[in-house]
Image (cartoon, helix red, strand yellow):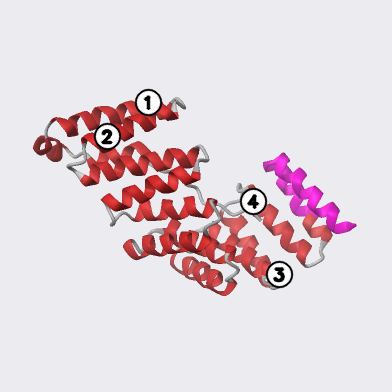
């Protein structure tokens, strides 16, 4: 029951936005050099030259150390690149360095939680997400990540609470409906999950994972025919995922 949230991180924009013209005028050449290196890093990252991009951001963190907000943004960007390349320990370390420089960054706290989650350090991840939400209560991604982490910790009631509040505050957030449905199904409340799966698909009919999760809930309820219907619908969107689901259904039929 895969559940993810789109993690489009504005890696280079974080630093470019931090380098305002007024700041450049008052901080001198180091800031101008940081601006130049940000463009270098952006180009390298877009071309998949991640090591070069990281080196550029590391240089920024050093030359702009007198402006903690800029150094923090550089470390944040380094962490985001490590997340992209699956180097989660390095990512977590970079996000922690960013937070040392700027403890008010909700994004760095959330991203630290994501890295720790990938490392299966769920309690620490939960604490990072909670901090992100305390810094920015409107940060939907961090609130969603709290729900996912409660689920991974086996604290289904807390996960359900987080998702229901998200749905209340953001009634068009399809992922919250799907995740709540998964949590209810895993808690033995499959019948309650079905309309939530339908709502998620209604809001976003192009997310393959929604059909996969819907089928799993039907399997939990013992309804093979309905599960196979979702597998057929999934095939049009993601044949590979549909094939995997077909295998899951076959195992349940034995």
Q: Position of residue 242 (x, y in %)?
A: 74, 45
User: Is 53 on the left or on the right of 69, as rendered?
Assistant: right
Label 2 SS: helix
The magenta segment is: 228-254
Whether residue 246 appears in magenta in the rendering, the answer is yes
Q: How many labels, in total? A: 4
Whether residue 74 appears in magenta in the rendering, the answer is no
Q: Name the residue carrying label 3.
A: 190
Label 1 SS: helix
Sequence-wise, the earlier of marks 2 and 4 is 2
- The disc placed on residue 60 is 2
Sequence-wise, the earlier of marks 4 and 3 is 3
Q: Position of residue 119 (x, y in %)?
A: 54, 51
Sequence-wise, the earlier of marks 3 and 1 is 1
Label 4 SS: helix
Q: Name the residue carrying label 1.
A: 43
- Report whether residue 172 is seen: no
Q: Name the residue carrying label 4.
A: 209
Front residue (pair 254, 211): 254
Quarter of image, res 135: bottom left
């Amino acid at each position: 029951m895969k559940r993810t949230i789109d993690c489009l991180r504005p890696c280079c924009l974080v630093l470019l936005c931090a380098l305002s013209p007024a700041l450049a005028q008052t901080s001198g050449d180091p800031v101008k050099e940081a601006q130049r290196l940000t463009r270098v890093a952006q180009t390298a990252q877009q071309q998949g030259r991640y090591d070069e991009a990281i080196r550029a951001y590391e240089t920024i963190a050093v030359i702009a150390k007198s402006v903690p907000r800029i150094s923090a943004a550089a470390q944040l960007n380094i962490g985001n690149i490590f997340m992209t390349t699956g180097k989660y320990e390095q990512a977590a370390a970079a996000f922690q360095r960013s937070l040392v420089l700027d403890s008010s960054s909700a994004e760095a706290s959330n991203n630290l939680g994501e890295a720790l989650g990938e490392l299966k350090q769920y309690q620490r991840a939960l604490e990072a997400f909670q901090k992100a939400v305390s810094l920015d209560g409107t940060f939907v991604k961090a609130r969603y990540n709290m729900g996912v982490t409660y689920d991974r910790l086996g604290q289904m009631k807390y996960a359900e609470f987080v998702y229901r509040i998200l749905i209340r505050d953001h009634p068009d957030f399809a992922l919250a409906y799907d995740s709540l449905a998964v949590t209810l199904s895993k808690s033995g409340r499959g019948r309650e999950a079905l309309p939530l799966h339908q709502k998620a698909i209604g809001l976003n009919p192009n997310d393959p994972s929604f059909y996969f999760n819907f089928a799993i809930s039907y399997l939990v309820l013992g309804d093979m025919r309905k599960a196979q219907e979702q597998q057929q619908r999934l095939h049009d969107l993601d044949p590979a995922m549909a094939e995997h689901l077909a295998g899951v259904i076959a195992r349940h039929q034995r």
